């Protein structure tokens, strides 16, 4: 069961209901629904909400989905709810992950377009107005755009490296025409400017519903499949160089914890399930098309390669517990297991070679001829060191 809360004038109305009942509680149509997935962001989510509330486009709704936060995030949401009737709160008592959180927001959304904003990120004050006007005038299904990246603690070298990485990843150097999504996807892959981040993008809600596009649930990297499916299905899409979105790098964010789960079964499953779903979603003629090969090679196979490396690093007992749920997953998992087996054999061979080399080296050093030669060369080695100093 989940709780839905709305501000109707001065009263806060709330209702507890099954998840599937959310759609029956929709409000009036608006131009843009902004979905904010929230988890343990009490210090920053207020700034995020203010950046949305102060948009020049006022005909919006703000759907905050609290994913069982253990801090005071929900209290902050309720304070903003009291002052702005455009805000709705979905409180999920069970931590379900970002994919589920966004999908809950999509169930309640009334907007013509959907914009997702991370609970510690910011929107430029005129972002929604400019994006809405562009999408309407050009009849776009989907529009991605660049984003700027800030670091809360520039003195932290690890955070600063992540900021540099994200900034380079999300910079847009090329101009793009309006294209069918699959063509745009191929062009982005060629230019190395394909990005999965589900914040710096806006999508037509009727388009998402028509193609049943939703996040995969229960895994990390939920934006991999979501963004890919959107571009695969869109008739009119583009990428803008304008950085309307500010992405915040900070300690203890969900993003900052990715490195700690690199060699876990959860990380493997996220890559494995997402890549398998991307394969399933791609029509065979497109998957095999030479024009689409940059996407297959650089994106899908790239994720599968990462998944295979994660799998190979897992303990054998963890590997044996992993099960495939679809035909594609079964085929992919079989290939990954073969890769892991070859990796194990390769590592074993390298270890044996290293051990053999070290053993041979020790035998040589222990030999009488080596000791004699070492003594004879002591003088020349000393002279050589002197020359190097001068």
Image (tube, rainbow, N blue to C red):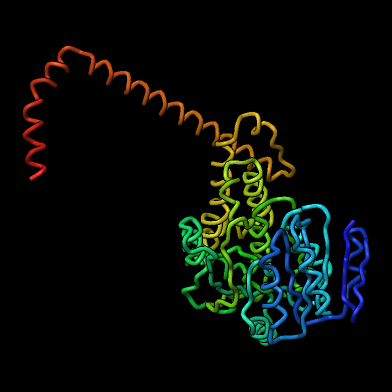
How many dots with numbers?
A: 0
Q: Residue at position x 41%, y 29% from top?
A: 350
Q: Decide which of 61, 292 is in the foreground and name it.
A: 61
Q: Residue at position x 52%, y 77% from top?
A: 241
User: Residue 184: where, in percent of width, then height?
Assistant: 57, 70
User: Residue 198: where, in percent of width, then height?
Assistant: 65, 66
Q: Decide which of 149, 110 is in the foreground and name it.
A: 149
**For residue 237, above or below residue 213:** below
Q: Is residue 297 left or right of residue 354?
A: right
User: Residue 301: where, in percent of width, then height?
Assistant: 55, 51
Q: Residue at position x 6%, y 27% from top?
A: 379
Residue 206 can be seen in this image: no
**For residue 293, above or below residue 45:** above
Q: Is residue 276 left or right of residue 381?
A: right
Residue 87 can be seen in this image: yes
Q: Residue furthest top?
A: 368
Q: Examine the image and state in which quarter residue 376 appears.
A: top left
Q: Quadrant of the C terminus?
A: top left
Q: Quadrant of the N terminus?
A: bottom right
Q: Decide which of 9, 234 is in the foreground and name it.
A: 9
User: Residue 212: where, in percent of width, then height?
Assistant: 78, 64
């Amino acid at each position: 069961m989940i709780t839905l809360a709305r501000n109707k004038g001065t009263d806060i109305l709330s209702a507890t209901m099954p998840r599937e009942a959310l759609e029956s509680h929709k409000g009036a149509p608006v131009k843009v629904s902004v979905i904010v997935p929230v988890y343990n962001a009490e210090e920053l989510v207020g700034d995020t909400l203010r950046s949305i509330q102060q948009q020049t486009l006022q005909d919006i709704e703000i759907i905050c989905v609290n994913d069982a936060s253990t801090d005071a995030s929900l209290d902050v949401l309720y304070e903003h709810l009291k002052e702005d009737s455009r805000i709705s709160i979905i409180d999920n008592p069970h931590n379900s992950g970002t994919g589920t959180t966004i999908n809950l927001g999509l169930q309640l959304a009334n907007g013509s377009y959907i914009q997702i904003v991370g609970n510690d990120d910011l929107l430029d004050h005129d972002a929604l107005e400019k994006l809405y006007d562009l999408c309407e005038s050009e009849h776009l299904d989907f529009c991605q755009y660049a984003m700027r990246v800030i670091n809360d603690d520039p003195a932290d070298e690890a955070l600063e490296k992540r900021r540099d990485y994200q900034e380079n990843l999300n910079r847009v150097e090329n101009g793009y025409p309006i294209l069918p999504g699959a063509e745009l996807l191929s062009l982005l892959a060629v230019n190395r400017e394909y990005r999965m981040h589900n914040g710096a993008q806006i999508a037509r809600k009727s388009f998402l519903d028509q193609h049943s596009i939703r996040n995969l649930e229960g895994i990390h990297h939920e934006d991999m499949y979501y963004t890919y499916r959107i571009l695969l299905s869109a008739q009119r899409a583009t990428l803008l160089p304008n950085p309307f979105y500010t992405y915040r790098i900070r300690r203890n964010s969900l993003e900052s914890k990715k490195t700690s789960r690199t060699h876990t079964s959860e990380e493997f499953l996220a890559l494995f399930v997402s890549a398998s779903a991307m394969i399933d979603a791609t029509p065979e003629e497109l998957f095999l098309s030479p024009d689409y090969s940059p996407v297959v090679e650089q994106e899908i196979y790239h994720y599968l390669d990462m998944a295979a490396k994660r799998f190979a690093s897992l303990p054998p007992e963890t590997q044996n517990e992993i099960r495939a749920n679809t035909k594609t997953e079964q085929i992919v998992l079989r290939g990954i297991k073969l890769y892991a087996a070859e990796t194990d054999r390769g590592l074993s061979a390298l270890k044996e070679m290293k051990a053999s080399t070290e053993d041979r080296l020790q035998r040589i050093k222990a030999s009488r001829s080596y000791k004699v030669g070492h003594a004879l060369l002591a003088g020349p080695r000393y002279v050589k060191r002197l020359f190097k100093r001068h």
